Image (cartoon, rainbow, N blue to C red):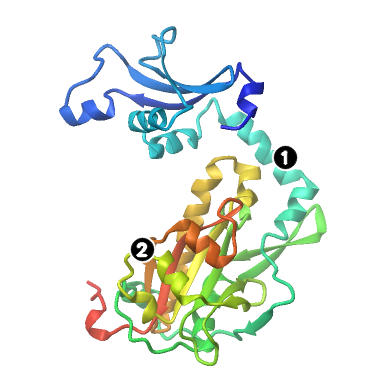
Amino acid sequence: MGSGWATAPARARTIALRRGKTRSARHAGQSRNPGASGQILVLCAAGAAPTLCFRESKEGLMNPRKISLDGSTTVAEARASAPLLELFHENTKYTRSRYPAQALTIARELTSRAAIEALSRNFKVYRFVERRALGPPAEPAMPLGAALRARVSTREFTGAPLSLADLASVLVPALACNRRAAVRHLPSVELRFRSYPSAGGEFPVEVYPILLRVAEVPPCVTHFDPRGGALDVLQPLDSAALEQALIADSGISRAAAALLVFTAVFERSSVKYGDRAYRLALLEAGHAAQNVCLTAAAAGIASLAWGGFFDDALNRLLGVDGLVEAAVHAVFLGHAREAAREKPA
């Protein structure tokens, strides 16, 4: 914890309310404290060192069980008592008591000229880099219903390359800006939208196509510009670094044609939605990835959604810091070995 805790000794934050049985007791089928209505975990700033206070019930607030956070074993004990996924989910809930303050923040973001102008620039721009125009996408080879039925996960690729035209058929309809709208009270400001939903139109997700086998393009790390459907070439690909960043890919990266990495620039959403922005960014990455899988299926290109990567290693490969912007999802593209393709029902 930073020094901010020492300067605010009276501050306390409820981290989790775990109703009923404790985690260990749930497996045994017995309540550790039958008289307790739940367990409240509070992060308390007491002096210079914060503590975790485990309060056995709403009624028993006078005698919390405190655990110091100044050692690794106590952190482990805290995590065992309240797993991080529970802490995260509890702290990003909308409740009737929390939401009024959040609603004020949202209202300010909706009316602030500075916020709206920032919203009109919710995309990254790489200057002084090589650009590869993708061109207009080809008409899809199949209608949406057929693409939904054809979308399957492919784990074995042939190693054959894709063309830039193939990438255009996948990326442009799935990820590019597809409409614009003027702001009623700020006619000089224009907002751009895409074919997948984003909370508040914030679009925190960026996409980095890593080109592994693309005709006439050496392997490289690129960034997809959603405004014009072009690829900005950021750097040559370090193939060894990519393999080390992927978990148990069983050689998939040596046979696929491209790996699309989805990152989230969290602040685009967090200024409006607070901690809930993390949930929203993950949802958006999923929406965008499903778009990619469907446009790939419609173009006869195989795909495989991939969540197995070492975060810091993949972030370094992309040139992002892992805090302000971080990798959250990925999708392989390529040509499938027919025998390895999943068969739709």
The answer to which of 305 and 96 lies nearer the viewer is 305
Position of the C terminus, as image quadrant, is: bottom left
Provide residue 179's location: percent of width, then percent of height. 65, 69
Q: Residue at horizontal 55%, vertical 70%?
A: 208
Disc 1 marks a residue whose amino acid type is Arg
Residue 210 shows up from this direction = yes
Q: Residue at horizontal 46%, vertical 87%?
A: 162
- Left or right, 280 with respect to 122, comes to left
Quarter holding residue 305: bottom left
Q: Residue furthest bottom?
A: 216
- Tell whether label 2 touches label 1 (CB within 8 Å): no
Q: Is residue 83 above or below residue 17?
A: below
Q: Residue at horizontal 52%, vertical 72%?
A: 174
- Left or right, 128 with respect to 277, comes to right
Provide residue 220's location: percent of width, then percent of height. 55, 79
Residue 195 shows up from this direction = no
Badge 1 or badge 2: first in the primary sequence? 1
Quarter holding residue 197: bottom right
Q: Residue at horizontal 26%, vertical 24%?
A: 21
**Residue beneath disc 1:** 108
Disc 2 marks a residue whose amino acid type is Ile
**Residue beneath disc 2:** 247
**Tag nearer the camera, 1 or 2:** 2
Position of the N terminus, as image quadrant, is: top right
The answer to which of 10 and 50 lies nearer the viewer is 50
Q: Secondary structure at mark 1?
A: helix
Provide residue 279's location: percent of width, then percent of height. 49, 47
Quarter holding residue 81: top left
- Left or right, 222 with respect to 337, comes to right
Q: Secondary structure at mark 2?
A: loop
